[in-house]
Amino acid sequence: MIRDLLYFFQKKHILFCLLICCAILIALFSMQFSDTKKLPLSNIKTDRLPEIKQTLEKAHAFWDNGKGDSAYFYFNKTRLLCEPKKNYADYYVESINYMAEILQRHGDYYEVENTLVKAFPYLDKTTNVKYAVNAYTFMAYNYHSTYDYEKALYYHKKALKKAFSTFRRSRIISEIAFVYMQQGKYQEAVDLLGPIAWLNIEDKITPSNTGYQRTAKLYNLGLSYLYLGGHKQEAFDCFTESLKVALTLNDDYELITCYYGLYKYYKIYNNPELKKINIEKAYYYAKKSNSKPYEISMLGCLIKAENDENIDNTESLKKHLKIYIRKTDSLMTAREKAKNQFADIIYNSKKDKEENLELKNQKAEHELQLQRQKNRSFISYIVISICGISVVFIVFYITKKGKRDRINEVFKNEKRISEKLELELEKDIDKILLFTAKSDLEKEENKEKLLSHLNNIYLTTRNISRENSEILTDENFEKALKEMISEYISPNLNIIVNGLNTFSWTKSDRAKKIVVFRAIQEILNQMKTLNDASLISLIFKKEEENIVVLYADNGHKIRQKYGILQKRLQNVENRIETIKGTINFDANSESGFKISIKFPI
């Protein structure tokens, strides 16, 4: 019976069952309570302050101990307790701000935005402007992390209007300048930072923040001068003063960026010896502070510095290269594990969303009403129970299946990326190690060959990173798609793209854009390895309410490997089916190989 029931659900009758159950419940309750006088809810407990404070204390305790997942759970629980929200606006907004910060640290930017917007209607109801300033600042950070700099500036400026203390205002101005730096507007950044960077503006609430903020402002001003050009002495003064302040903080983490700034300075002004000394110090403090991302980044810079034409240290280079590869792989694995663990926390927390509190209110109301419902029919409660069990069973099935599908998808992606890294990098690394062992690297030609091999590894890892990176689905989608396609152009392969700008992609939702991007990327990847084409044509056109993508090449080698291609492109077919599209292959064309993709706008 259970197997038949599951089969029934799998045939997409779940929505129908839910509607029937809801209709029965509505009709039943309408009949039962139509003549029942609605009872006042004034006796329901509304003072949640003690429970809110107690839960918030637990959240802060976990946060202070570095346990972000547990802290997120209790901040979310605090948020749910704040009903009505306007009566507990401070606690409600504070909890959301901490949740947003935790989500940002785990890179879940979409969830950050969804979380923060819930706080905005209550910012004016808080008793302290810091809650509004923090909310706008976290939203700005979120857009900055997703490269939407204009929106990041918008929310930083909203935070600036709310801030009243000199320290907070200077900190926000520094953040605005940093966004300008990311946009390449170095003069605007200098104009903002110049008047405040050298001032020792004190944080009266948390005095320890004073030094940290000053060294950050000087560092950003130094970078702005450096990239602006023509300000050699000003850039040097900023970097040295930033380092001087950082040394007084007794914080290894701050010293990383200070020495990195001096490394950038000596790199641009061509001093290989001082460049290497400073990046070695940055790498040392990155290891000391146990910052894995910074350690890998600084080590990469150190490897480049050791390949400088005036520096010859083969053994050190081989040692650092091995460490770099090992730590990069270890960091990727650790990040994926942490991401999966945090995803479970988010999933479990969502099960206790606002409906949890609503059920508590409904239960209290129901208990009051039961006093006037002693003569209700027994059969009504049987029907309610059956409907309730059905709804619970359906919800459990959907959530369980969704979680299992997400886990399987994550596992497949991890396996695919791992196999690709092993396949494409293993031979290259062995080749480099063999070359360095057998060759005299004092010879200029051997140095050039080594650098060429290292550059190939870098390009390969960069391409793999781009293949699995986030896809822009805003107004920059067309540009991102063109850039991705152009990366496959080589001296032996030319790609012609037509029709991409003849219609607007704005009507297509985000999911369809991602599917098209990944499908074309996967097709080009497979054709690069399986086909011998020298010319590829990609045509985009609109047919009524559909978008059609036509791929064609002049290769002939694919006919022998058509079975392999079909198997490898199975994932592309699955993607296209998810957006109600179709894909057709033509391997028998005399002029080459052709693929046609069609999906609704």
Image (spheres, grey):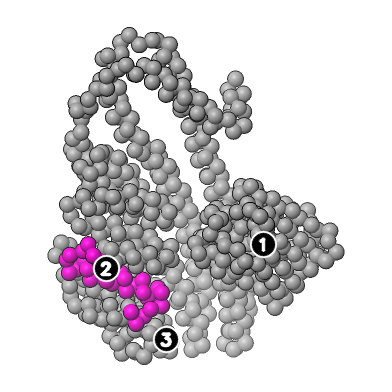
Name which of mark 3 and mark 1 comes first in the sequence: 3
Q: Residues within 10 Å of mark 2 (few under 14, many from 20)?
A: many
Q: In the shown orientation, is residue 11 left or right of residue 54?
A: right
Name which of mark 3 and mark 2 comes first in the sequence: 2
Which element is circle 3 on?
helix
* Front-lying residue, 240 or 471: 471
Q: In this figure, which residue is indicated by the disc labeled 2? A: 172
Single out the mark in the foreground, 1 or 2.
1
Q: In the shown orientation, is residue 547 left or right of residue 149?
A: right
Name which of mark 1 and mark 2 comes first in the sequence: 2
* Residue at x-position 51% and y-position 25%: 20
* Residue at x-position 17% and y-position 69%: 166
Q: Is residue 176 visible?
A: yes
* Most frequent secondary structure within the magenta stretch: helix
Residue 52 percent coordinates (x, y): 22, 40
Report the span colored magenta: 160-188
Q: Quadrant of the C terminus?
A: bottom right
* Residue at x-position 24% and y-position 39%: 84
Q: In this figure, which residue is indicated by the disc labeled 1? A: 541
What's the residue type where badge 3 is placed? Ile
Q: In this figure, which residue is indicated by the disc labeled 3? A: 268
Is 173 a magenta residue? yes
